[in-house]
Image (spheres, rainbow, N blue to C red):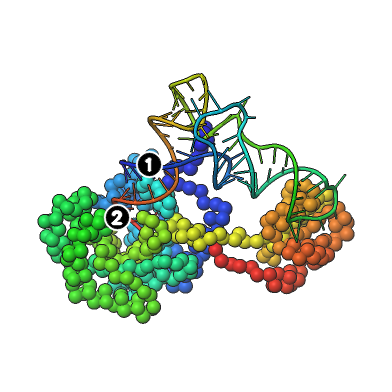
RNA sequence: GCGGCCGUAGCCAAGUGGUUAAGGCAGAGGAUUGUGACUCCUCUAUGCGCGGGUUCGAAUCCCGUCGGUCGCCCCA
């Protein structure tokens, strides 16, 4: 770029053209599917008090320590651009006293911000879609949210997805397990990869996330978390699995799937793909019964998930080109008095629900017809000075070349006529 | 934040030190001043992400920088 020109900031991008159709499709599917489950959309602020995130995400996490967009406003408040969606939703529910109003189901969608090295499917301003259910510890809630995630992805017709499932138990279970894991790993400390050596003291569970072959080698004989589940967590886990099976959802148990922070409890899951390289997770979630309390609310069980929309869009794009919605009418006009006529006809047709564009170029009719063809319009309304006089308007069907004459204005206002004409033409919805 | 690769028009892309930077798509105009699809013609980068350096000469070599991409970290 020239030094004088402006460009989108690193890790941000414009979404337009054929890509925007994918976003609209995605958002429509989400609205439909979550709406049918009676989830309420919630839109929380893009920025919040910094403290909300440091408490809600965890003081020791990379997100809080090195990835947040934090700034001081003119009133000397420390604010942060939200790096994820859950904390704001929880804050809102606490603030509006919704947590003692029975089970609350909500979903959100919007931009999130993390200062990371950008890559395909990973932006600094990115978008997440998420759902949260508050106020139920019933395993059916876990099953419901997972089923919704799966339904949504099915609606997008994305192949090659895997639902991975685990239980991280209750906090006491995890503490006992963590002690056992550390005891097992300590003799091998020198052989672990450097990141895992640090985790050994800071957050041992996350060693399971390591991609180092040497570390994974050592872990093959390590104690497994599921063996340490207490009876309550164990029963919950079994009921979740029974529910998934009853709904016909296939899942893969993955004992290496972990969550590091204390308020995560029991269910943990991820939906992964093999088509995105290192960005394998398109969505993830689980139960976080301790979060509301950590944010100062009355203890409330909760379960939910979030998906990275950029990643879904990348996957949709790999499915191939998306056809733009075709134009129904293209209005070409050339000569005295045709301008007004073109405006009136476009209004009549648009009010009947058709997609209509007027050619504004005033160039030769042949040129205008050519554009109608390029745009893939079904029909072309042709206006010249003769038509202004006669009020008999030629409408040409571009696929067949057949031209008919329509009375203005009566013929154009006749919904039934146009509906019949278009009934035979396939009009794909789709992405 | 760390390491590798890459950056020529709206898009794809040839050129890898020698005077005027191929080609294709898209776009504009014309052959065709009232009718599209095919065809043909013309136009569209004083410029090779940006800045500096080496050289008689740089898109090409060097340094820096910005951006993208792959992996790590982290996560969705």
Q: Position of residue A43 (x, y in %)?
A: 44, 58
Identify the mark nearer the N-term, 1 or 2. 2
Subunit of label 1: A
Q: At 46% from the left edge and 66% from the top edge, which residue is drawn?
A: A158
Q: Which mark is residue A73?
A: 1
Q: At 43% from the left edge and 51% from the top edge, which residue is drawn?
A: A120
* Nearer to me, A245 or A90: A245
Do dots 1 and 2 share one subunit? yes
Residue identifier under label 2: A57
Q: At 20% from the left edge and 67% from the top edge, which residue is drawn?
A: A225
Q: Which mark is residue A100?
A: none
SS of the residue at dot 1?
loop
Subunit of label 2: A
Q: Is residue B36 above or below residue A142?
A: above
A309 left or right, relative to A402: left
Q: Is residue A324 above or below residue B29?
A: below
A15 left or right, relative to A416: left
């Amino acid at each position: 770029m020239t030094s004088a020109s402006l460009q989108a900031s690193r890790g941000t991008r414009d979404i337009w053209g054929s890509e925007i159709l994918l976003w609209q499709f995605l958002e429509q599917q989400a609205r439909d599917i979550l709406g049918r489950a009676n989830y309420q959309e919630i839109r929380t602020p893009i920025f919040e008090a910094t403290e909300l995130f440091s408490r809600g995400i965890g003081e020791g996490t990379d997100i809080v320590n090195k990835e947040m967009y934090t700034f001081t406003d003119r009133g000397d408040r420390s604010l942060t651009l939200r790096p994820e969606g859950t904390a704001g939703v929880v804050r809102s529910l606490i603030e509006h006293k919704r947590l003692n109003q029975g089970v609350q189901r909500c979903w959100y969608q919007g931009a999130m911000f993390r200062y990371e090295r950008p890559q395909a499917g990973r932006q600094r301003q990115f978008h997440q879609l998420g759902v949260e259910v508050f106020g139920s510890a019933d395993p059916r809630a876990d099953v419901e949210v997972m089923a919704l995630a799966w339904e949504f992805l099915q609606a997008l017709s994305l192949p090659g997805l895997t639902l991975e499932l685990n239980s991280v138990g209750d906090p006491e279970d995890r503490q006992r397990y963590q002690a056992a894991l550390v005891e097992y790993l300590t003799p091998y400390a020198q052989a672990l990869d450097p990141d895992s050596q640090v985790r050994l003291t800071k957050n041992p569970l996350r060693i399971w996330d390591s991609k180092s072959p040497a570390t994974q080698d050592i872990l093959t004989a390590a104690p497994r978390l599921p063996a340490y589940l207490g009876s309550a967590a164990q029963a919950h886990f079994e009921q979740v699995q029974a529910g998934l099976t009853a709904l016909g959802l296939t899942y893969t148990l993955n004992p290496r799937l972990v969550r590091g922070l204390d308020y995560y409890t029991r269910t943990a899951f991820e939906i992964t793909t093999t088509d995105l390289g290192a960005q394998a997770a398109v969505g993830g979630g689980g139960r976080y019964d301790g979060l509301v309390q950590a944010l100062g609310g009355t203890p409330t069980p909760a379960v939910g998930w979030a998906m990275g929309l950029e990643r879904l869009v990348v996957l949709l794009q790999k499915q191939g080109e998306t056809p733009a919605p075709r134009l129904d009418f293209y209005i070409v006009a050339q000569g005295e008095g045709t301008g007004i006529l073109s405006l009136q006809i476009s209004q009549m047709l648009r009010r009947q629900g058709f997609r209509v564009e007027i050619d504004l170029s005033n160039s030769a009719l042949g040129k205008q017809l050519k554009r109608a063809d390029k745009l893939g319009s079904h029909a072309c309304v042709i206006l010249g000075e003769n038509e202004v006089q006669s009020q008999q308007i030629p409408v040409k069907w571009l696929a067949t070349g057949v031209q008919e004459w329509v009375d203005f204005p009566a013929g154009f206002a006749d919904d039934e006529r146009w509906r019949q004409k278009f009934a035979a033409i396939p009009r794909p919805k789709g992405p």
